[in-house]
Image (tube, helix red, strand yellow):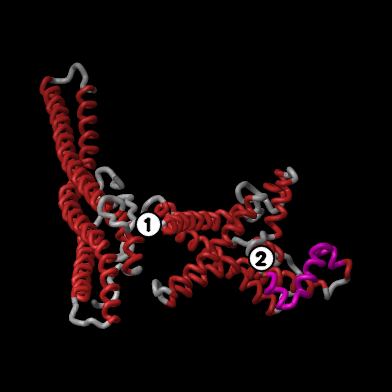
């Protein structure tokens, strides 16, 4: 099923059997609780009205939880049986997989020797002695015999692997059928999912797929934020993904699923993804503006215009005049806003100035339409690249504040870009590879995911989905899958 041909079989027999024991223990706990409740129902020595109400309630509860006993019992038995079968299948298939790797390597070498021997035999001149011809023939025959022997050995090991793989699939199918019997078959006992449960499952799947899309957008936005329309969509999705990451980490911490340090790291990375680049841009623009304004103040108006240009002078004076509050406000409102550089390229593309967009505006080559493409990739920030280009000029006034802002912007840009790339790649890899995205929407979760914990898909290597069984059991016992309290 999910196994790779001629490789070790997926799944851990020890883990499956441990989960089987856990579910069996849950079933036994239910049995004991049912027995205790039945004793309460059968106790007629106390005739007080309050005790009559207690007996009635105990009877109702007993009937409800008894319905779920089969679910845990059958699941435990199915997992335990499958675990034993999985161990046997792996004991047969895994050694064969290891031998196959060695045999295939030896076969490749043997075939090369055989080809060389046949070539030497064919290349013998007609004048060669009979002894030389006999030696060449024996060498070719021996080499071909070695090849045939290895091919037979490989066929034997492949049969062992196929036998183990078939046993595993057969056992898995039996286990799934047994579990499905208590989830949606004859032994469901009225514990089917409600319409609301089904709606929640669908919504959960849609959310996970959307989260993966946001993670992908977080990576693509780094490179394609300049593209008209698409760039804006990617920026919005990336920002939403960062917000979702922040919320999820806080919720997980509140539930006790992660520690305080992990929560702080997750929230920090999310906040950095939202505001880090914009804050760094603000520092870079301030460093450039401070340098322009202070340098221009020592020059005549004409000389300043000649050195920087009217547009740069005006924008620098405006930026330099911003208060701290205005700078903070600008950063906070900007996660959904593209940079001025991205907007400029997008405008050129929108107006059909493709050559200007891809070669003229700081540009060199697609898909990095910027003059210093490598620098922009490393920095991930137009404003920082622009600031670096500005400080390459001579005759600038650079005081300690300007120098510090310049250093903070440069180092911060590299760190922010590296962290964002790594974080988005890690989230995406975890989402898809770990069953937190499309995988779980299409069936990566299962009965073993809740209650006893773990992931059935990882345990068995099968895309099984019996989530609705968990939902029904949890409705009776709560999210931990255990009977609350002592009866």
Q: Secondary structure beneath disc 2?
A: loop
Mark 2 is surrounded, within 10 Å at the Cα level, by few (under 14), some (14 to 19) or many (20 or more) other residues, namely some
Quarter occupied by the N terminus: top left
The front one of 438 and 282 is: 438
Residue 209: % across, % down = 48, 54
Which residue is tagged 2?
Answer: 334
Going 20% across and 16% down the picture, which residue do you hit?
A: 126
- Of 452 and 191, nearer the camera is 191
| Residue 205 vertical placement versus 271 (above, below) | above
* Lower sequence index among marks 2 and 1: 1
Determine the image quadrant of residue 327: bottom right
Residue 375: image tag: none
* Lateral position of residue 451 relative to residue 356, left or right: left
The image quadrant of residue 31 is bottom left
Magenta highlight on residue 82 = no
Report the front residue among 36 and 457. 36
The residue wearing badge 1 is 193
Mainly helix, strand or loop, the magenta region? helix
Name the residue rendered at 18%, 45% in the picture. 167
What segment is highlighted magenta in the picture? 303-330
Q: Residue 277, relative to residue 261: is it above or below?
A: above
Give the Cα distance between marks 2 and 1: 44 Å
Q: Is residue 320 in the magenta section?
A: yes
């Amino acid at each position: 099923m999910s196994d790779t041909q001629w490789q070790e079989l997926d799944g851990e027999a020890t883990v499956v059997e441990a989960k089987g024991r856990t579910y069996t223990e849950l079933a036994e706990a239910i049995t004991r609780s049912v027995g205790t409740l039945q004793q309460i129902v059968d106790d007629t020595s106390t005739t007080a009205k309050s005790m009559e109400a207690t007996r009635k309630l105990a009877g109702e509860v007993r009937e409800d939880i008894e319905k779920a006993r089969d679910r845990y019992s059958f699941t435990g038995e199915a997992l335990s049986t499958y675990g034993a079968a999985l161990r046997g299948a792996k004991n047969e298939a895994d050694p064969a997989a290891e031998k196959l790797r060695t045999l295939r390597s030896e076969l490749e070498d043997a075939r090369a020797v055989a080809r060389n021997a046949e070539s030497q035999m064919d290349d013998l001149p007609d004048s060669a002695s009979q002894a030389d011809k006999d030696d060449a023939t024996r060498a070719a025959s021996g080499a071909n015999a070695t090849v045939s022997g290895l091919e037979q050995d490989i066929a034997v090991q492949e049969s062992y692997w196929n036998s183990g793989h078939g046993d595993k699939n057969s056992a898995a199918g039996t286990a799934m059928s047994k579990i499905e019997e208590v989830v949606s078959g004859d032994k469901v006992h009225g514990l089917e999912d409600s319409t609301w449960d089904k709606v929640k499952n669908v919504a959960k799947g849609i959310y996970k797929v959307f989260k993966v899309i946001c993670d992908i957008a977080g990576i693509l936005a780094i490179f394609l934020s300049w593209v008209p329309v698409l760039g804006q969509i990617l920026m919005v999705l990336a920002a939403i993904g960062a917000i979702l990451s922040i919320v999820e980490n806080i919720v997980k911490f509140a539930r006790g699923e992660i520690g305080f340090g992990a929560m702080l790291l997750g929230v920090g990375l999310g906040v950095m993804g939202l505001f880090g680049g914009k804050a760094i841009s603000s520092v870079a623009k301030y460093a450039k503006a401070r340098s322009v304004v202070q340098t221009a103040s020592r020059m005549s108006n004409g000389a300043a215009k000649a050195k920087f240009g009217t547009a740069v002078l005006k924008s620098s004076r405006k930026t330099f005049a911003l208060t701290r509050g205005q700078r903070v406000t600008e950063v906070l409102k900007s996660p959904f806003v593209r940079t001025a550089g991205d907007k400029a390229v997008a405008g050129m593309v929108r107006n059909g100035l493709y050559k200007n967009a891809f070669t003229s505006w700081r540009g060199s080559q697609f898909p990095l339409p910027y003059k210093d493409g490598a620098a922009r990739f490393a920095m991930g920030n137009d404003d920082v690249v622009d600031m670096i280009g500005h400080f390459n000029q001579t005759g600038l006034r650079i005081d300690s504040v300007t120098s510090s802002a310049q250093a903070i912007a440069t180092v911060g840009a590299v760190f922010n870009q590296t962290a964002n790339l790594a974080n988005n790649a890690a989230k995406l890899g975890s989402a898809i590879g770990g069953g937190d995205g499309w995988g779980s929407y299409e069936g990566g979760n299962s009965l073993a995911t809740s209650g006893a914990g773990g992931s059935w898909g990882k345990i068995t290597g099968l895309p099984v989905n019996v989530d609705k069984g968990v939902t029904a059991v949890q409705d009776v016992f709560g999210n931990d899958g255990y009977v609350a309290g002592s009866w």
